[in-house]
Amino acid sequence: MRRFFETIPAVFTWLTLILMFVLSFWLPVWVSIFIILFDIYWLLKTVFLSFHLRATYSEMKRNTKIDWLARLQERDVRKDAARPAWDELYHLVILPMYNEPYEVVRESFIRLAGAHYPKEKMIVILALEERAGEAVRAMGTRLEAEFKDAFHRFLVTVHPKDLPDEIPGKGSNEAWAGARAKEEIIDPGAIPYDRILVSVFDIDTQIYPEYFGRLTYAFLAAEDPFRAIYQPVPFFVNNVYEAGAFARVVSFSCTFWQMMQQSRPERLTSFSSQSIPFRTLVDIGFWQKDIVSEDSRIFWQGFFRYHGDFRTEPLFFPVAMDAPSAPTFWGTVKNIYKQQRRWAWGAENVPYLLEGFRKDKEIPRKKRWYWTFSTIEGYHSWATNSLMIFALGWLPLFLGGKHYNETLLAYNLPHITRLIISLSMVGIASSAVLSILLLPPRQQKLRIRDYGMYLLQWVLMPFTLIIFGAFPGIEAQTRLAVGGKWRLGFWVTPKGRREKG
């Protein structure tokens, strides 16, 4: 059944792509009507999501201006006696690392050390990989010497290579680091599991000063706080002035999607950097070691462990990360594509959740159908929507034959679709403006023409939706369906810094 479920995303995607051509030939009139309706749907969805984007932006803007530590000190946000006081909570921070440059890693630790939160309540784990070599271990020793006194505890772990039932990657490293923290710090120190919040960050993640205060407040104010993962919004802005236009457009698009999802918590799952109660993490069994998409799989592990009584709690608060980049244009294009393909490999969760729904009848039927549809539809849209919008506006004209091309519908089809898509460009324009508002401060002040270029780069979005959206989505789903040697392993996005302006 697992292998059958693994083919479902690719089957739906390829069936859609094939039918685009077949039906444009056999039923061009019906295809023309469909694409007009689909374009109208896309326009309405763009408007709908833009409201969520604006709502999240407003909420984040408010949250980043609040002194959350002072808010915690002013009043007790606990709703029952079973919850700890804020100053009883520890924050365990795990940063898995492979072979990233020292300056990138050090920047992340500087931001951690600058957090507006009591450092005696912070435990930091630098999770290294044995397969990365001695140079990385030496870097870990150097970082430990520099930052060990900045926190309550600082631990460097080394994940052994070639362990059975694992694939090399972030998930297996995180699981190893979490287990070492439990055995070497938490259990010997008799720290209660329900007094610890675990934040796992990509090594390039730089927190904003109030992150742990905001996280603590959200945890203590949440209903049933141990049945949730706490999700910040990723801002890919650490190297935004160094990255190329393609990288900026793709990265901001990801940020905007995550912002929209924050205002739709019923559809929100975990992504990239995230936080979770340690008691819950131990009960779930840490991160799975044999998958690529551990950041989203941890949500589904909790979902099935608690028979559907699990959620992702939006923080409406950002963390800063790197956009994919490289010294050359084609190197950047390659890195963007590979990163998107790895994210698209999250389709490996489809067989996991379908098998879980098949076995766990305690989950309400409505919830099972909702998540089944929304998850499969999400990956299907990822791989097909941009191609349908691009192709179906003209494909019936080429394949529909002479009789169809003489109809009024054929004459008006490109004009109608162009008009609808042009109206939906309002969403791209609003995204362009918002991307300017999210730019971090820069030593060298931006000029008017710089702002113009940052706005103009959004004309690339139709291309990025296809090249860095549909294509990697199709490839990932096809590889999942074929299986065997075609399955993807974990690909580490290269990090780096050039001289800052």
Image (cartoon, rainbow, N blue to C red):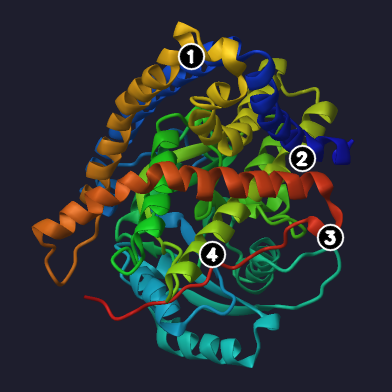
Looking at the rendered structure, the kind of residue marked 4 is Lys
Circles 3, 4 touching at the beta carbon (< 8 Å): no
The image quarter in which residue 125 lies: bottom right
Q: Which residue is mark 1?
A: 410
Marks 3 and 1, how far apart at CA:
45 Å
- Residue type at mark 2 is Tyr
Q: Is residue 84 visible?
A: no
Which residue position is annotated with label 2? 352
Q: Position of residue 215 (x, y in %)?
A: 41, 49
Q: Quadrant of the N terminus?
A: top right
SS at mark 1 in the image: helix
Which dot, 2 or 1, sits closer to the camera? Answer: 1
- Left or right placement of residue 87 versus residue 200 in this view: left
Mark 3 or 1 closer to N-term? 1
Q: CA distance from mark 3 to mark 4?
A: 21 Å
Viewer-nearest residue: 218 or 372: 372
Identify the amino acid type marked 1. Ala
Between 383 and 69, the one lying in front of the other is: 383
Q: Nearer the viewer, mark 3 or mark 4?
A: 4
The answer to which of marks 3 and 4 sits earlier in the sequence is 4
Name the quadrant containing residue 135: bottom right
* Residues at marks 2 and 4, CA–CA distance in whole angstroms: 29 Å
Amino acid type assigned to the residue bearing label 3 in the image:
Lys
Q: Which mark is residue 485?
A: 3
Q: Is the residue 310 above or below the residue 251 in the image?
A: above
Q: Are marks 3 and 1 in contact (CB under 8 Å)?
A: no
Q: Secondary structure at mark 2?
A: helix
